[in-house]
Amino acid sequence: MREISLLLVLVGVLAGCGPSETPTPEPDVPTVEELAADPERLKELRRQCKTDRSNLGDVLCNRVAEATNRRFFGDGKVPYTPQETPPKF
């Protein structure tokens, strides 16, 4: 009985370890880098995503949001440099 339960557990674990599906990129959706490089197009797509997200699709609107974040925050490589003298309150 114990061997059967161990065998069933082993089969269950191996069944869950199948190959995962890789997402296929959509050819007509621009990349985040392309969107971040074109601010006018990004602005127009942001407006369209706000009003008609269902027709544009989640993939495009998520990329538009990511490109907006990258343009706002930059590349994130600017180090923090504190002042030489502490502020006086």
Image (spheres, helix red, strand yellow):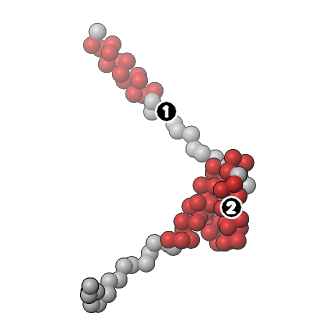
Helix, strand or loop for disc 1: loop
Name the residue: 33% across, 13% down: 4
Instruction: State left or right for residue 46 relative to residue 10.
Output: right
For the point 27% across and 13% down, the residue is: 2
Q: Quadrant of residue 14?
A: top left
Quadrant location of the N terminus in the rendered image? top left
Query: In the displayed structure, would residue 1 be above or below residue 48?
Result: above
Q: Which mark is residue 72?
A: none
- In this picture, is 61 found above or below 88? above
- Whether residue 25 is visible here, answered yes or no, is no
Q: Which residue is mark 1?
A: 18
Q: Position of residue 84 (x, y in %)?
A: 29, 90
The picture places residue 45, in percent across and down from the top left corner, at 69, 61
Q: Which residue is mark 2?
A: 47
Observer able to see residue 9: yes
Q: Nearer the viewer, residue 60 or 21?
A: 60
Quadrant of the drawing holding the C terminus: bottom left
Kindly report the distance in space between the C-alpha atoms of the residues bearing marks 2 and 1: 41 Å
Tell which residue pokes out farthest to the top in this image: 1
Residue 63 drawn at (x, y percent): 61, 58
In this view, the mark in front (2 or 1): 2
Closer to us: 4 or 67: 67
> How far across and how far down the image is residue 68, in percent?
58, 66
Q: Check disc 1: other Cα within 10 Å, few if <14, some if 14-19, many if 20+.
A: few
Q: Is residue 76 shown above or below 30? A: below
Q: Earlier along the polypeptide chain: callout 2 or callout 1?
A: 1
Instruction: Between residue 8 and residue 67, name the one nearer to us.
Output: 67
Q: Residue placed at 46% from the left, 72% from the top? A: 76
Mark 2: secondary structure: helix
Residue at image position (39%, 78%) is 79
Amino acid identity at mark 2? Arg
